[in-house]
Structure formats: C-alpha cells, structure tokens
Image (cartoon, helix red, strand yellow):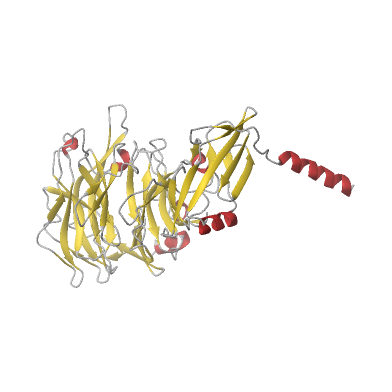
Amino acid sequence: MKKFLLLYILILSLFACAPTPQDVRQSDELPPIYPDYCDVTIPANICPLNFLVRDDIEAIQVKAGDITVNKRGNEVTFDEDEWRELVAKNEDITVTVTTLKNGEWTAYRSFHWQVVKDLLDPYLTYRLIEPDYEIWNRLQIKQRCIENFDEEALCDYRHADNQCMNCHTTGSQDPNLSMLYVRGANGGAILNQHGQLRKLAIKTQDMISGSVYFGFSPSGRYIAFSTNIIIPGFHSKAGKRLEVFDSKSDVYVADLKENRIIRSPLLSDSTVFETFPTFSPDGKYIYYCAADNVKLPQELKQLQYALVRIPFNEKDGSIGTQADTLLAAQPVSANAKSSVCHPRISPDGSRLLYTVQDYGTFPIWHQESDLRLMDLKTGTVDTLALVNSQKSDTYHSWSSNSRWFVFASKRDDGLYGKPYFCYVDRQGKAHKPFCLPQKSPTFYDNTLKSFNTPELSKGKLPFDARDVEQALKLEAEPFR
C-alpha cells in the first residue's frame, strides 16, 4: 500500500512539473507582462517583482540572472530568499521570458532590471477607497512593507463606525510623527507622537472648515494646513465623470505644542483660494498653491492655481509679510497644463515635485494631470516624459534619501489608482517607474479598490487600527 501511494505521488508530481522550452522561436518584441516591469530601475530592498503574461499561454519560463522559474499557466512568482540574494549581488539583471502557446515556444526580447543601492523607505501607507463618486464606504488606511508582502491596517472602517477617513501623512518620513483624519461624529485629527495618540480639533469658529490638506514642519511642532469648502459636480460631456473644486479655501499654521492657530492675512485672503501647504525641509518657507477667485461653477475652467511661497520662522512660529510667486498661473493652452497642485519638496531641498492639470484643484479626476519636477537651484522644470502616462498621475511623496518618489497613477484603466515608484539619480534624471509588487500576480486584476495618496515612511508605524479606535473615544483637544 505504501509503495502504491509513493508511486501515485510520483506520477502526480511528474504531471505537475512545468515543461521546459525546446525548438524555441525568437521574437523581437518585449513580453506582454503585467505589471510592466520591463527595463525598470529598482532598489535593492524591494520585494519580488511577481508578474503575469497577458496571453493565453500553457506554460512559461523566466530567467532572471541566475534564477530560472518554470511554471504552468501565465503567472510568475519568485522565491523570496532567492530574490533577496539576486538583488543583493547584481546591479544589472537580464530577464528573458519564454512562453508556450499552441505547442510552440517563443522567447521574447530580453529586458533589464537595474538594481541601485539607494534604498526605498521600507514602509508605504495608503488609503484604500472605491474609485466612485456616489458614496464612500469601507475605507481603510493601511501600511505595507515594500521589502516583503506584509500589510496591516492603521485605520479601518470596522473600528471607526464606517466613517470617512482622510489620508495619513508623516513628518519627514518619520514613523514616530504622523497624522490622519477621521471625519464625522466623534472624529478628529489623530496625531501620532512616538506611538502616543492624541485626538485634536484643529478648528476655530472663524474658520470655514477643519483642517484638510497639511504638512509638518521639520521640528514637528507645527503643521501648515488648509481649510476647504469642497464642492463635487458632474460633467455633461463624455470622457469626464466628476469635477471637484473648492468654493473657499485658506491656509493656517497650527502649533501642536500650545494648541494655537497662527494666522496671516496673506494666507486667508477672501479674494484668493489658498491650499496645499507644505514646509520646506529647512523650515524657512511654506509652499502652497493660490488661485484668484472666480465665479463657480460657471468659470471653473478659469480656476488656475499658481505656486507660491511665504517665509516662516520655526523659532517663534511667525509667518512672513511677503509671498512670492514661483510659478504663475497661465491660461490653459494646447501645449501647457497650467494649474499647479500638491507641491512636495525633496528632503535634501534640491527639487520640488508637483502636479499640473488644465484647471482646478482635484487632479485625480483629471486624466490630463501630470507630474513635474523643478530644480530649486536653477528653476528648470522637467516634464517627466518617461514617468507620466495618458491618465492621471498625482498624489506623490518622497523617500527620505531624496532618490525615490511614489505616486498614484491610473495609467492602467483610468479608474483605479496604483502606487508607482520612480528613481531620481544624482544627476536629477527620473527613471521609468514601476508598480508596487504584490504576492499574487493577479492581485490588481481582482482588487476593486484604488490606492490613494501613498506616503513613504522610514519605519513601521507604532500603532494600528485598534489604537485609533480607542483614540476616537477621547475628547478632542481644542485649538485657540
């Protein structure tokens, strides 16, 4: 009986083995793999780039350096230990994909993975949200280790009464300083300081709303934040589904130590929309976007945001008396997108990454939205032709070493945003981006959630969804 069982197992294993290529036909084309990992630059600490072939094939062989993977079907997954060894000892990995279809083997043109020692920050946070405009439901903010496939919830609808939650942002990519918002009853700003959570009500009676977009100062004592009245609208023309714009917006600074609001008339001008504030890495400036007031929604396409900065003094929390325009708003043209959103400065202070679109302030719903990279020393702007797609590319953040940024792109279908990583070398050249790898190559095909506002962190966040649930029960600390 035992011999029969062993023979049966042996026969099954023989049939399960994937065939190996023979009589191979050569193709000059790159393989139709998804995600598109052909000729990308990757960090040495990234998890395996598992992928599938978009074709009805019977079997596949992949040679990546000295690793060979033979599989039935169209999915390729790498052993994690072999992968770590591969990227640790190679700077340039040649990858060859050979597939079996209708009894014929085809070897596609080889491509390369350039491995760099400039590492990505190991943790990524993002909000998972249905890419719809009717309702929000079952939201989650999660953190994922990019060195493996571990993921956990920082905020979860099941522990937050299914309330709306806004994005999670760290201070200087430090996991010990971060904040997220939970909206609605018993909601507030949940501030993380070394794992201790505080619930804040960052709003006074004279403000039009609570804090919406924000960024930490280098010391972590202050945040610059905007207050926004956000209006959704619907397009009557085909090709556009939703428009979101501000009918009012102002910028303030909050002192998180003394729970006070710092104001400037230059940042709360009723004739100007101010939004998207962020501190420079040295704390000397607040960068933000500003647009002249127009009649909405009738003149929405004339709503053009400029890039502006104003001095700030971290020693006493004072705001300067003169704002300077770095990129002026221009009428939209066929050759230039003119409205600026989401300025983010690299931690080394050398470059500013921002989004441009035809008009307005909500680029995720604009297919034409693209990223731009400004050299702050020379003022030159890179249009990032190798990075941008024909769909929305926006919601970006930097890695702590200033060599990488992550952004949300809808390049696959125009609907679902996914995190993409882009390497910026020491000459300032941006390389072809790659999508966040998943353990299952079919993950993105089967996931009906959009990855919203990805943020990088130097370490694991010291709290989870249960901790946020308890923090929401606290009395919100008022500001004056």
Residue located at (58% from left, 51% from top):
66
Closer to the camera, 319 or 431? 431
Residue 459 location (% of width, % of height): 43, 64
Residue 323 location (% of width, % of height): 12, 57
Residue located at (19% from left, 54% from top):
378
Residue sitting farthest toward the right: 1
The mark total stands at 0
State which quarter of the image contains the C terminus.
bottom left
Residue located at (46% from left, 59% from top):
465
Residue 186 visible: no
In the rendered view, tell whether residue 286 sits above or below residue 257.
above
Residue 38 relative to residue 282: left or right: right
Closer to the camera, 150 or 229? 150
Residue 460 relative to residue 319: left or right: right
Closer to the camera, 160 or 150? 150
Residue 396 relative to residue 330: left or right: right
Residue 129 location (% of width, % of height): 41, 45
Residue 48 location (% of width, % of height): 53, 51
Residue 303 visible: yes
Closer to the camera, 101 or 80? 101
